[in-house]
Image: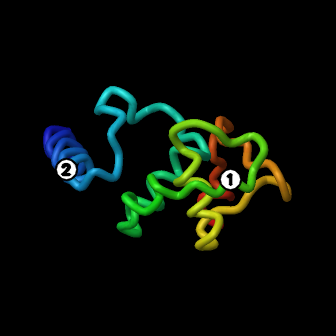
């Protein structure tokens, strides 16, 4: 049990130090929203600075901090909307969406 606790702590520290996630250790048990997943994906690709400056918005339900991440993820084919003009950014990402 101690070994798994140490491994968890090391994994968390490594992922956080890479800047991929930033919610804090206390939030690891919470579900990830579609907008958070778009941000994580863009960070993993290594183009976060470009996403922050991305101004085009193709979804009518997207606004706020995640707009650039979502639209860039769409543009790159990483994530798509739930319909032609909606993304449902606040919805929890499903296992099937994550696999896709």
- Rendered residue at 73%/49% (across/down): 87
Look at the picture and state if 57 lies above or below 99. Answer: above
Look at the picture and state if 5 lies above or below 97. Answer: above
**In-image side of 37 versus 82 (left or right):** left
Q: Position of residue 25 (x, y in %)?
A: 29, 32
Q: Residue furthest right?
A: 84
- Rendered residue at 65%/35% (across/down): 90
Quadrant of res 63: top right
Q: Name the residue tied to disc 2.
A: 17
Label 1 to label 2, Cα distance in Å? 30 Å
Q: Residue furthest bottom?
A: 76
Q: Residues within 10 Å of mark 1 (few under 14, many from 20)?
A: some
Front in this rendered view, residue 58 or 26: 58
- For the C terminus, which image quadrant? bottom right
Q: Name the residue tied to disc 1.
A: 57
Q: Position of residue 23 (x, y in %)?
A: 36, 34
**In-image side of 11 versus 50 (left or right):** left
Quadrant of res 40: bottom left
Front in this rendered view, residue 24 or 53: 53
**In-image side of 93 versus 29 (left or right):** right
> What secondary structure is marked by label 1?
loop
Q: Position of residue 68 (x, y in %)?
A: 54, 53
């Amino acid at each position: 049990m101690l070994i798994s606790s140490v491994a968890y702590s090391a994994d968390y520290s490594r992922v956080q130090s890479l800047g991929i996630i930033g919610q804090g250790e206390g939030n690891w048990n919470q579900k990830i929203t579609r907008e958070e997943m778009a941000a994580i994906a863009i960070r993993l690709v290594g183009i976060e600075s470009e996403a922050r400056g991305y101004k085009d918005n193709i979804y009518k339900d997207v606004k706020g901090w995640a707009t650039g991440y979502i639209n860039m993820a769409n543009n790159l084919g990483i994530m798509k909307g739930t319909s032609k003009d909606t993304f449902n950014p606040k919805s929890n990402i499903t296992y099937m969406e994550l696999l896709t």
